[in-house]
Amino acid sequence: MGGTIARVARTWSVVLAVALGASVLLPAAPAAAHNSLTGSDPKDGSRVATAPERIELRFLATPAPDTTKITVTGPDDAPAASGAPTFSGKRVSVPFTPGPPGVYTVAYQLGSADGHPVKGELSFTLTTGAAATRSAAPPTTAPTTPADPPTTLSTTPASPVPAASRSADGGTGWWWATGAVVVVLLALGGGLLLRRRAAHG
């Protein structure tokens, strides 16, 4: 009889212990509904020399695209994400646009089953980033001196009188000479005739 009572007591003790343990664990159930970050690439606090093409975040549970926001900022809070995040199971990746060397911060915000958003951030240092864009200075050109005007050789003949004119003048001179000779001859002939008539008269 005494042994049976002892066994029943021990059984109830076990049942109570299990019940108490379950009651202690029950408040932790809502906390399990919160998602959390489990890893990233680049890792939080790391230093990288080669800028990655994408930044990847890994979470405890699959994040919902509608309630997930991820931002990437570089030195001077300049945006460093070049596109919308892509989702693959529990992984989320964002295209990365590197800027100058410095610390880059990745901030995330996730939705949760109980309606409370989960926020967090990580950072990494880019040791060799893209150089800052500078406006190119116009090339310096030496002042140009105006070129001397081209020297044109005159093709005008030395004599302003055309050849045709000279030949024409020459021909006119011959005509005048011939006419003068004829006039002289006629005058001489007329004089001789007058003398002869006077002699015979």
Image (cartoon, rainbow, N blue to C red):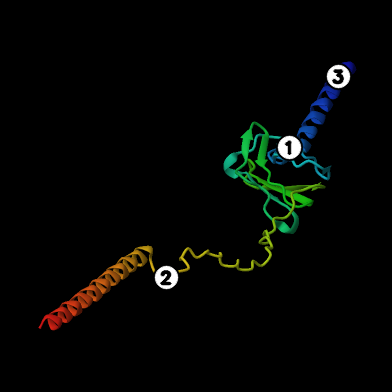
**Quadrant of the rendered image containing residue 12:** top right
Mark-to-mark CA distance, 1 and 3 = 29 Å
Mark-to-mark CA distance, 2 and 3 = 152 Å
Residue, disc 2: 160
Residue depth check, mark 1 versus mark 3: number of the one nearer the observer: 1
Q: Spot the residue most to the left.
A: 201
Q: Residue at x 82, y 30 (%)?
A: 17
Question: Could you tell me which quadrant the N terminus lies in?
Answer: top right
Q: Amino acid at mark 1?
A: Leu
Residue 149 shown left or right of residue 61 in the figure:
left
**Quadrant of the rendered image containing residue 77:** bottom right
Residue 77 shown left or right of residue 172 in the figure:
right
Residue, disc 3: 7
Q: Amino acid at mark 2?
A: Pro
Q: Residue at x 69, y 41 (%)?
A: 34
Mark 2 or 3, nearer chain start: 3
Residue, disc 1: 26
> Around disc 2, counting alpha carbons within 10 Å, would you say few (fewer than 14), some (14 to 19), or many (20 or more)?
few
Reply above or below: 177 against 80.
Answer: below
